[in-house]
Amino acid sequence: MRPTPVLLLAAALVQAGLAADFPEPYNSEPGNPDPMSPQEALQALNLPEGFEATLFAAEPDVQNPIAMAWDGKGRMWVAENYTYAERQKRFDLSLRDRVLILEDADWDGVAESRKVFTDQVQMLTSVEVGRGGVWLMCPPQLLFIPDADGDDVPDGPPQVMLDGFTVAEANYHNFANGLRFAPDGWLYGRCGHSCPGKLGVPGTPEEDRVPMKGGIWRYHPDKRIVEVLTHGTTNPWGHDWDANGELFFINTVTGHLWHLIHGAHLVDSNTPNPLIYEKLDTIADHYHYDRSGKWSDSREGKANHLGGGHAHIGMMIYQA
């Protein structure tokens, strides 16, 4: 008998509270005076057959989550982003972002404890745990906070491992994100094509930097080198590996499912190579929005039955 798959979602914890000097976040979009409760949101989910969902954590114990990761103890690490602001501000640097540790010690699907690992970062888009510390994507930098003894207290200030991840003036939502360690031991990440950059370890000369025009990249923690694996797509915000170690990722606007082939140049590629032709396309058998009009028209939700609108975020491969 196979165990029932469980989706862990955002319930209340016994520990809460902000650090004494943590800036109080504000609601920049107070349009809905009566939002659904966490329990109501849970009941409104449409789940695949055989799945069930529980409330794992909810406001006020976790707010503005932008990414999460799991450590070797089965704990959830959550990146909370408060500095990403309304378009007029872009980023509100009077605020700070933080990283939480949520633990469900009795494995009932509800987190009982909550810790703040750090609340001293800004422009946080992703968190990953491993190799003696915590990795944070804070464009334009990839940061590493050492915690060699695993006591959930930083051993020192953040170390800049990579820089050069540009944050666009207009489409800044395309910025680098998606840290995940791969089966090959490299740290993988993503970036949208509106935030092209030139990557390198701090101090790398301009001519030696690796051009990034959107797509998938990876970083080797020991060799401290960075590689761009593919250029293209519009704004990827999810990837995963299957049982064979093949990487697939999702994207907005130009197609929602892609297969990573090292060195590939994909449709909508803002590539640095001027000789590229016949770019590779999505592997999906359909588009996830109505292409009879502008992609932005899909925001109205009239064609959600095609797959959820023009923008997807978050991806996991489940192979029973």
Image (cartoon, helix red, strand yellow):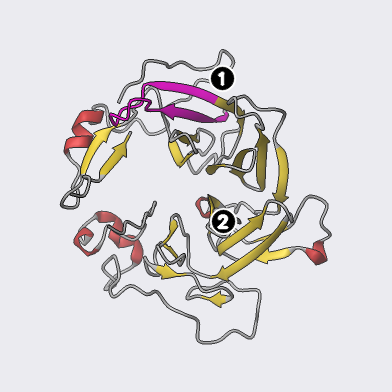
Residue 28 point in image, percent of width and height: 42, 32
Q: Is residue 13 above or below residue 202?
A: above
Q: Amino acid at mark 2?
A: Tyr
Residue 36 point in image, percent of width and height: 23, 31
- Which contiguous range is marked in magenta? 96-116
Residue 7 lies left or right of residue 95; in this view the side is: left
Task: Identify the residue at image location x=21%, y=36%.
Answer: 42
Looking at the rendered structure, which numbered label has been put on residue 188?
A: 2
Crowd tier of the residue under label 1, counting other residues whose Cα lies within 10 Å: few below 14, some 14–19, many 20 or above: some
Residue 228 found in image quarter: bottom right
Q: Which one is closest to the eye, mark 1 or mark 2?
A: 2
Q: Can residue 34 be seen here?
A: yes
- Mark 1 falls on what kind of element? loop
Q: Amino acid at mark 1?
A: Phe
Is tag 1's residue or tag 2's residue first in the polypeptide sequence?
Answer: 1
Q: Which residue is mark 1?
A: 22
Instruction: Find the distance from the CA under tag 1 to the CA under tag 2.
Output: 30 Å
Q: Is residue 112 magenta?
A: yes
Residue 242 point in image, percent of width and height: 40, 62
Q: Is residue 57 above or below residue 49?
A: above
Task: Identify the residue at image location x=66%, y=40%.
Answer: 144
